[in-house]
Image (spheres, grey):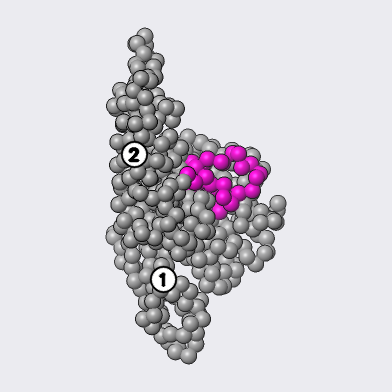
């Protein structure tokens, strides 16, 4: 194990913090083996945004300690997910003029174009998180997937740019540092979830990944192996629990338990004759809750969430290309009737996505739930590119590395990814270094 590359995914969610320790399978390099898993309740995160530093740090420490104990590996470096209503996306076109008209377009030309997009003006108080190429244009020749090797003077591309609020990024970095860890990569959560749940065929033919979490509902739209659109909707399972709490006049833990055990997404599927008795406190009588009324509360809020998701799918411009429909994941996808409700309001085929697509049988029972999709995807991101045009493992030189204690140097990573197929890995490295540059310079963390 000392010669294996070890990657840790850390999902800091609104309801839980999950840590997954994984390594690449020896026989099948497209799969990973779960070595350790740890989970802790999250009380310091609201709608994907850290609201209490100390509580979040404590939850991170607990999850990491449990994962470390199970895997027998000292964890120092993690891949971290980010979400929240502060996430913004937009499309931007960029281009460069090449100095030589005789040489072919090279990897360096593509990287120069991509690096220039990190200089795109954005709103004050924000930072660019990911720059995702859509398609390239060479001397007005459009719809080019890979321009390397072509002849041309003007190299252009359309980009999907994802930004995050600087203060939210700073709070994540503070929590990670206070927990005694270092960030390897910071990745948008729906992109991470897609790595764990989607098949290559779905990404190719067109699919929308919808991750219904505790604080947010995240969306990632893929077509022709390219990420076309992302969005973070600031509603998730917690707001449904809040509605049940208010509508049925219950305590929050009672409302959550009622939702999980008896909740249905479609009111017609609930019987008006069935009731659940909720014990009262301090000699108060038990309160009877109609399962029909409970389902009506859930359906009303879920319908609102689905409508927002559908608006984003239409906004992506890929609605007519989603032959594989929608893949639901996250804890909210376990709600009874949720698949049928999505199909009813979107007209698209829907399946529930479990994050076991690329896992070996080892310890698979620990993470065989949609709620762990983001954590599994963050671990997978250590071995794969975020861009679906590169489905090869990042360690494609077959030289084992050890990353559980120290990070691979920037120079080594650039050497490993010296082809266009790994250009997104360089973008990730550049984002990581940009985010971490100021961490070591500040002592108030």
- 372 part of magenta stretch: yes
Name the residue carrying label 2: 302
The image position of residue 386, as x and y in percent, is 49, 60
Q: Quadrant of residue 50?
A: top left
The image position of residue 82, as x and y in percent, is 43, 50
Of residue 196 and residue 269, the one placed in the foreground of this image is 269
Disc 1 and disc 2 in contact, CB within 8 angstroms: no
Q: Residue at x 39, y 17 (%)?
A: 277
Residue extending furthest toward the bottom: 102
- Compared with 350, 414 (above or below) is below
Q: Residue at x 37, y 70 (%)?
A: 158
Describe residue 256's horizontal placement relative to residue 196 as left or right.
left
Which stretch did the figure color magenta?
352-380
The image position of residue 18, as x and y in percent, is 52, 42
Name the residue carrying label 1: 135
Q: Quadrant of residue 130?
A: bottom left
- 281 part of magenta stretch: no
The image position of residue 427, as x and y in percent, is 47, 65
Mark-to-mark CA distance, 1 and 2 = 35 Å
Say whether disc 1 or disc 2 marks the residue closer to the N-terminus: 1
Of residue 24 and residue 183, the one placed in the foreground of this image is 24
| Residue 170 seen anywhere in this rendered image of the structure | no
Describe residue 311's horizontal placement relative to residue 26 as left or right.
left
Number of numbered discs visible in the structure rendering: 2
Of residue 41 and residue 363, the one placed in the foreground of this image is 363
Q: Residue at x 38, y 56 (%)?
A: 230
């Amino acid at each position: 194990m000392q010669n294996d590359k070890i990657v840790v995914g850390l999902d800091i969610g609104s309801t839980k913090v999950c840590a997954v320790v994984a390594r690449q399978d020896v026989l099948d390099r497209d799969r990973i083996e779960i070595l350790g898993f740890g989970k802790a309740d999250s009380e310091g995160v609201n709608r994907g945004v850290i609201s209490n530093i100390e509580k979040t740090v404590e939850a991170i420490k607990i999850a990491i300690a449990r994962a470390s104990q199970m895997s027998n590996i000292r964890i120092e470096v993690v891949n971290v997910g980010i979400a929240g209503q502060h996430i913004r996306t937009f499309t931007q076109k960029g281009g460069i003029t090449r100095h030589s008209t005789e040489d072919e377009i090279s990897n360096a030309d593509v990287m120069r174009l991509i690096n220039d997009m990190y200089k795109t003006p954005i709103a004050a108080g924000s930072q660019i998180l990911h720059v995702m190429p859509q398609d390239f244009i060479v001397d007005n020749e459009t719809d080019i997937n890979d321009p390397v090797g072509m002849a041309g003077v003007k190299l252009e591309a359309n980009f999907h740019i994802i930004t995050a609020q600087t203060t939210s990024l700073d709070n994540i970095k503070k929590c990670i540092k206070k927990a005694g860890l270092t960030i390897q990569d910071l990745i948008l959560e729906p992109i991470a979830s897609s790595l764990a749940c989607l098949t290559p065929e779905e990404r190719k033919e067109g699919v929308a990944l919808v991750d219904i979490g505790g604080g947010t509902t995240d969306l990632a739209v893929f077509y022709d192996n390219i990420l076309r659109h992302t969005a973070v909707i600031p509603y998730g399972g917690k707001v449904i629990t809040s509605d049940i709490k208010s509508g049925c006049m219950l305590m929050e833990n009672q409302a959550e338990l009622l939702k999980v055990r008896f909740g249905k997404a479609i009111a017609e599927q609930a019987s008006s004759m069935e009731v659940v008795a909720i014990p009262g406190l301090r000699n108060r009588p038990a309160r009877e809750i109609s399962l029909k009324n409970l389902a009506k509360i859930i359906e009303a809020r879920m319908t609102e969430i689905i409508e927002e998701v559908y608006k984003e799918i239409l906004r992506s411009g890929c609605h007519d290309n989603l032959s594989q429909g929608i893949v639901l994941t996250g804890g909210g996808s376990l709600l009874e009737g949720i698949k049928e409700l999505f199909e009813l309001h979107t007209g698209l085929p829907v399946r529930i996505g479990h994050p076991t697509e690329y896992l070996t049988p080892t310890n698979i029972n620990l993470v065989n739930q949609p709620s762990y999709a983001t954590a599994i995807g963050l671990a997978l991101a250590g071995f794969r590119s975020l861009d679906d045009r590169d489905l090869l493992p990042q360690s494609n030189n077959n030289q084992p590395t050890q990353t559980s204690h120290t990070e691979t140097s920037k120079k080594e990573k650039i050497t490993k990814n010296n082809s266009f197929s790994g250009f997104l890995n360089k973008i990730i490295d550049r984002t990581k270094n940009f985010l971490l540059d100021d961490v070591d310079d500040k002592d108030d963390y």
